[in-house]
Image: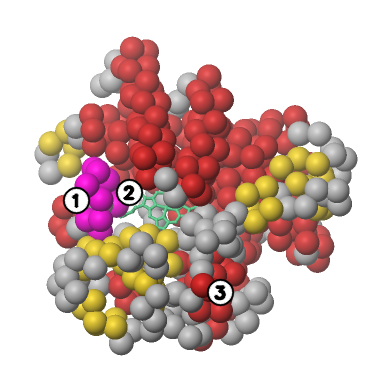
Amino acid sequence: MTDHIPDELSVVGKDPRAYTDPLRPLHGIVRNAQGEWVLLRHALVVQAALDHERFSNAVSSHLQIPNGLDGDEHTAYRAALDVFLDGEALAPFHERFRRVAAELLAALPRGVAVDAVSQLGARYAVRAQSVWLSWPADLEERLVAWVAENHAATRSGDRARTQRVAQSFDDIIRTVLDHCRATAREHDADNVTARLMRTEVNGKPLSEAQIVSVLRNWTGGDLGSMALCVGVLLHHLATQPALQSRLRAPGVPDAEFDAVIDEILRIDDPFVSNRRVTTCPVTIGGVALPEGARVKLNWTSANRDEAVFGDADAMDAQRNAPHNLVYGIGKHVCPGRLLATLQMRILLRELLAATSSIALDAQQPAERAVSPVGGWAKLPVVLG
Ligand code: HEM
């Protein structure tokens, strides 16, 4: 354990992996410049994520449903909301996501560089989520611009800017809710947003603020994460010709695609961390934390812990799957895993079917994102 991080191991301006890889063998837990305790090792991240009573999710003064809730209240909201994201609920969207991917790929140029993150990942995420939620297609430019601004605000570390961006997302959501009310009688429309507007928890309908919060959590963080995940996946495909040709072969089952996607994201997890706050004094990793300590579960680091995975960069989907933390663990485990995996698998299948090659652009270098964001900021690829 260290009380402060030495300058040469500072997080500033670094890929989160370059920051945590050298620290993790030395320290399971470190304190960052903001005074937060960052858990770096797999065992410690799992320990905190499973200890819901002592590591609370009530980390923000803003309404966050369901992420900011604890205990029975959290369980009740998850039960009401998870049904929107299960296999049965998502079945009607497979073909629609496929069409979104096919149309987007057909419009991308061949033989010249395209940015896998902004031109493919962010566009696809926005269009696929808009289809899922039945949001108007003319919101696309506003949402794409929002993903880019949210990314820039997170990177800047400027809290006021981050709050302004969060507020602007709420304004977009309120426009959608007004549109939904104006175009369909709320009680009749059979789409995800309209059904959410009629959802009840413990016999009470969700308030407008709660609906906005749920939609923010279903889209706000996710659009950016999806764009980053697509960048990470394409980098692996472009730099690993053997993997690319294996997945191009006819008849690769869905389960194999999903396992490869999970394993690539484990190696380079762009969804870096989530926060907790201690509800009482807790000792973790040999460090005594007081009540009220702010703690970060660093998934990116835990997913590369040599104590669990050996060589973190070696792909072994089958062996590593049981320890994979890309979607978290415990009560707050990601409810959107199925949707995210489905959207990524469909995009990859369509991409491989629509191209004969995917390569990094020889002229423009790819750019890593820097902490607190993971993955690639820019990934110029050439589709053949
Ligand atoms: C793009 C890939 C995604 C990744 C890597 C990811 C990752 C995660 C992780 C690690 C957590 C655990 C948070 C914690 O323990 O504090 C989480 C929670 C959550 N995710 Fe995802 N997620 C993704 C996509 C999605 C999608 C598509 C949705 C919904 C449409 C979604 C909705 C949520 C919500 C609502 C929570 C909070 C759950 C709770 O606190 O009970 N995520 N996600």
Residue 62: which quarter of the image? top left
292 shown above or below 109: below
Residue behind mark 3: 8
Q: What kind of element bears circle 3?
A: helix
Q: What kind of element bears circle 1?
A: helix
Q: CA distance from mark 2 to mark 3?
A: 43 Å
101 shown above or below 189: below
Which segment did they paint magenta? 57-67
Q: Earlier in the sequence, mark 3 or mark 1?
A: 3
Farthest residue to the left: give it. 203
Residue behind mark 1: 76
Residue behind mark 2: 82
Q: How is the image coloured?
A: secondary structure
Q: Position of residue 112 (x, y in %)?
A: 85, 39
Residue 64 appears left or right of 333: left
Please report the residue visible at 68 percent of the width from the left and 33 percent of the height from the top.
104
Please report the residue visible at 29 percent of the width from the left and 83 percent of the height from the top.
287
Residue 126 appears left or right of 77: right
- As drawn, the label of residue 33 is none
Please report the residue visible at 27 percent of the width from the left and 29 percent of the height from the top.
197
54 shown above or below 188: below
Viewer-closest of 263 and 164: 164
Q: Earlier in the sequence, mark 2 or mark 3?
A: 3
